[in-house]
């Protein structure tokens, strides 16, 4: 059967508007501040492990339970290993969680300004959703999450705003939603927030999701994880095993475990990024930018007189990449990842000369 020029089978394709990830330019001379990666490398112990790897390990399937990594994460967070789920980046973990928990047919709730992957998964899995407006300061109004729903997902700190909501706010939302699964996406929590992980001991319906991509410097390795009650973790694993038993590869399991073991290095690296964030705040302020207090490894900045789109474009043509979202309410903001001192200086020195030349 044909309808117009469309073949029959073409009518039955699952049509989705995909999430558009930030660019990964090949040109190494580009100052890349557009995807919130860590400017510093993984633990030297990870490097040592990779130097000593034998390709023989690829002959066998990896451990489907990823025990080595699960146990290391369980130890790090002080929970039992039955409370830890691991996946191929937190995008994989979150997507699996949407598929596993958001099946009531009622709308899933999340803020109108947040990680733009959430509506994409809802559309992919045909999950109804309803966005809740953040207030004029991009803060959550907890009352918006008291209504009947099929689940809640909150990024804390939020992206792209960088704002952290107090744990009391999170607990309030969880406590008002005992009949739904509440997911807290903590991709940036290590940069200044307090994790909701301790609350998972008291709330069976709370799932906390984190990633190796930001504070653990391993975006390219693709590791994410969730911590929650035994019931939630078991449900996630049942779906995982119905989908693909072997999600993480041998190297990711080994390198991930090694990274988690090196605690001192992890905390030192976070401190370095926070110091650079403070430096970035200082310079941005001098340049006439305004931004909310960041608890993440990026700043969400708007300039008092020059539009963000103009700045994004001029930066881009000068090989400085930041993220710009042409979306309602945030189209006059730039999301600037915290880079090395050298990268930050290139950005700010450029802005300084561009803005002063423009004023004249
Ligand atoms: C970066 C990010 C993720 C995804 O990270 P992965 O690389 O897939 O682990 C998830 N949520 C938010 C809010 C992020 O910023």
Image (cartoon, grey):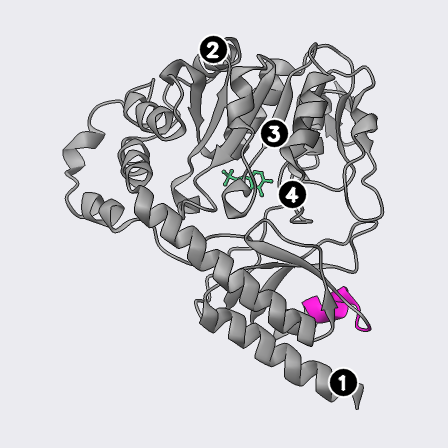
Q: Which residue is mark 1?
A: 358
Q: Nearer the viewer, residue 177 or 112?
A: 177
Q: Which residue is mark 2?
A: 230
CA separation in Å, label 4 and label 2: 27 Å
Q: Which residue is mark 4?
A: 164
Circle 4 SS class: loop
Upstream in sequence: badge 1 or badge 4: 4
160 left or right of 233 in image: right
206 left or right of 85 in image: right
51 left or right of 84 in image: left
CA separation in Å, label 1 and label 3: 42 Å
Disc 1 vs disc 4: Cβ atoms closer than 8 Å?
no
Q: Main secondary structure of the magenta part?
A: helix
Upstream in sequence: badge 1 or badge 2: 2
Disc 3 vs disc 2: Cβ atoms closer than 8 Å?
no
Image vertical order of residue 295 relative to residue 285, above or below: above
The answer to whether any part of residue 70 appears in the image is: yes
CA separation in Å, label 1 and label 4: 34 Å
**Mark 3 or 4, closer to the camera:** 4
**Within the magenta stretch, is there residue 280?**
no
Residue 204 position within the rendered picture, expressed as x and y whole percent measured from the top left: 57, 12
Residue in the picture at 62% in, 15% down:
101
Q: Nearer the viewer, residue 342 or 21?
A: 342
Circle 3 SS class: strand
Around disc 4, counting alpha carbons within 10 Å, would you say few (fewer than 14), some (14 to 19), or many (20 or more)? many
88 left or right of 351 in image: left
Figure quadrant, ligand 1: top right
The magenta stretch is 305-312
**Mark 1 or 2, closer to the camera:** 2
**Mark 1 or 4, closer to the camera:** 4
Upstream in sequence: badge 3 or badge 2: 3
Q: Which mark is residue 184?
A: 3
């Amino acid at each position: 059967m044909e309808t117009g020029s469309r073949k029959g089978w073409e009518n039955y394709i699952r049509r989705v508007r995909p999430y558009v990830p930030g660019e990964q330019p090949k040109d190494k001379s580009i100052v890349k501040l557009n995807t919130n990666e860590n400017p510093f490398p993984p633990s030297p112990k990870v490097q040592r492990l990779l130097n000593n790897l034998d390709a023989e390990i690829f002959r066998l399937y990896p451990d489907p339970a990823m025990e080595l990594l699960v146990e290391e994460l369980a130890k790090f967070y002080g929970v039992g290993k039955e409370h830890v789920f691991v996946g191929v980046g937190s995008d994989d973990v979150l997507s699996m969680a949407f598929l596993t928990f958001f099946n009531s047919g009622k709308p899933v709730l999340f803020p109108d300004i947040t990680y733009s992957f959430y509506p994409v998964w809802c559309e992919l899995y045909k999950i109804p959703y309803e966005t809740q407006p953040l207030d004029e300061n991009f803060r959550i109004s907890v009352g918006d999450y008291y209504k009947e729903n099929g689940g809640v997902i909150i990024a804390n700190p939020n992206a792209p705003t960088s704002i952290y909501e107090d744990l009391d706010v999170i607990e309030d939302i969880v406590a008002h939603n005992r009949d739904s699964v509440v997911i807290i996406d903590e991709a940036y929590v290590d940069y200044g927030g307090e994790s909701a992980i301790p609350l998972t001991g008291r709330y069976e319906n709370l799932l906390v999701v984190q990633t190796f991509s930001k504070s653990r410097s391993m975006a390219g390795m693709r590791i994410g994880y969730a911590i929650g009650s035994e019931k939630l973790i078991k449900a996630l694993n049942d779906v995982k095993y119905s989908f693909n038993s072997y999600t993480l590869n041998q190297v990711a399991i080994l390198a991930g475990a090694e990274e988690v073991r090196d605690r001192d290095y992890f905390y030192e690296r976070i401190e370095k990024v926070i110091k650079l964030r403070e430096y970035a705040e200082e310079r941005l302020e001098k340049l006439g930018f305004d931004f909310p207090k960041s608890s993440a490894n990026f700043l969400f900045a708007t300039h008092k007189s020059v539009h963000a789109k103009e700045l994004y474009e001029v930066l881009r043509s000068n090989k400085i990449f930041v993220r710009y979202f042409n979306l309602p309410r945030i189209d006059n903001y730039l999301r600037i990842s915290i880079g090395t001192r050298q990268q930050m200086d290139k950005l700010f020195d450029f802005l300084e000369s561009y803005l002063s030349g423009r004023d004249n």
